[in-house]
Amino acid sequence: DSALIPEGVKRCSFKAFSLWLLVIFAVIGWGVLGGFLVLWKGLNQTGLNDSFGFGLYITADLAVIALGAGAFFTGFLTYVIGKKELKDIINLAVVVGFICYTGAQIVLLLEIGQPIRGWFSFWHPNVHSMLTEVIFCITLYTIVLTVEYLPLILENRQLDKVPEFHYFSHNLHEIMVVFAATGTFLSFFHQGSLGGLYGVMFARPFAFREGFFIWPWTFFLFVASAIASGPALTILVCKMVEGVTRKKLVRREAISTLAKVTGYLLAFYMVVKILDTWWWATQTAPRMGMNFADFFQTPYGM
């Protein structure tokens, strides 16, 4: 397969390759088993119920989407803002984001209970539900990510020899700024809606927040945390792959630029989050007839 891989790239041994595949297939097999149990026996397999519809299962689902924000934010910095040095790492960000969002799509398929009726979410949408907006935006952004992922496949040495693929890939690069801007728009709203989700769930009164117009403050906090933590995951994956392969994959300039932006955003988020919590404890909760200590005494503060 030397004709299919980039020039100058050295293959690892078949033994090492098999070990990596074993780890990957073990994780995938675990997920397939869990998905099969949910579809076969029902959503009760998640351990959640109507009284407490939140747990590690949902937390992981939301976290995967937030961490996948590295794709849209890095794309925004690269193509819209014009940080050309990030072109060294944008491909990795797209791959990480693609994995996160396709994983989230699969989880959504399981969460609706009857995947065969998944089209109901689009044909009979509940316009009062945050999840409707989330499903629409995640689906559309997954399509955008797929388009952004296509050039990575078409840049293969053999595929690039086909004139149609070569010109199609080149033209995609020329208009990638359009997809980057579209992805930023879609991701901004669904990331925020996932943040607002915390405040409307039963038995989560400590997550209730006032806000601006129709959006609670958690909407903006979740967007800030996503665009800060997403690129951080991209950097972490890059460094882990470099450590395992013992090869330099991305120039230090690209890592430094993305790390600085991430650091500033995380610092901003921490300050705003502290102020938000202080305002909630001293102003919002008392206006609702509860004291800060009430949330830590009896179940759900009731």
Image: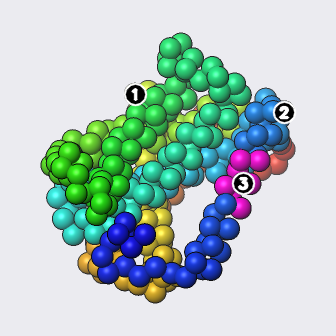
Q: Which residue shows up at 38% across the image and 44% down it?
A: 146
Task: Specify whether 144 is left or right of 112.
Answer: left
Mark 2–mark 1 distance (CA, rounded to whole Å):
41 Å
Mark 1–mark 3 distance (CA, rounded to whole Å):
45 Å
The answer to whether residue 201 is seen in the rendering is no
In which image quadrant can residue 220 be found? top left
Quadrant assignment for the C terminus: top right
Answer with mark 2 or mark 3, whichever residue precedes in sequence.
Answer: 3
In which image quadrant can residue 154 be found? bottom left
Dominant secondary-structure state across the stretch colored magenta: helix
Q: Which residue shows up at 65% across the image and 48% down it?
A: 59
* SS state under label 3: helix
Which class describes the residues within 10 Å of circle 3: few (<14), some (14-19), or many (20+)?
Answer: few
Q: Which mark is residue 41?
A: 2
Q: Which mark is residue 29?
A: 3
Q: Which residue shows up at 28% across the image and 73% down it?
A: 254
Answer with mark 2 or mark 1, whichever residue precedes in sequence.
Answer: 2
Q: Amino acid at mark 1?
A: Phe
Range covered by the magenta-colored residues: 26-33
Q: Amino acid at mark 2?
A: Lys
Residue at the outermost bottom position: 246
Q: Amino acid at mark 3?
A: Gly
Asked if residue 31 is among those painted magenta in the image, a careful observer would answer yes
Q: Where does residue 169 sit, x and y in percent of width and height?
A: 23, 50
Q: Which mark is residue 213?
A: 1
* Disc 2 versus disc 1: nearer the observer: 2
Q: Where does residue 69 sit, x and y in percent of width and height?
A: 43, 52
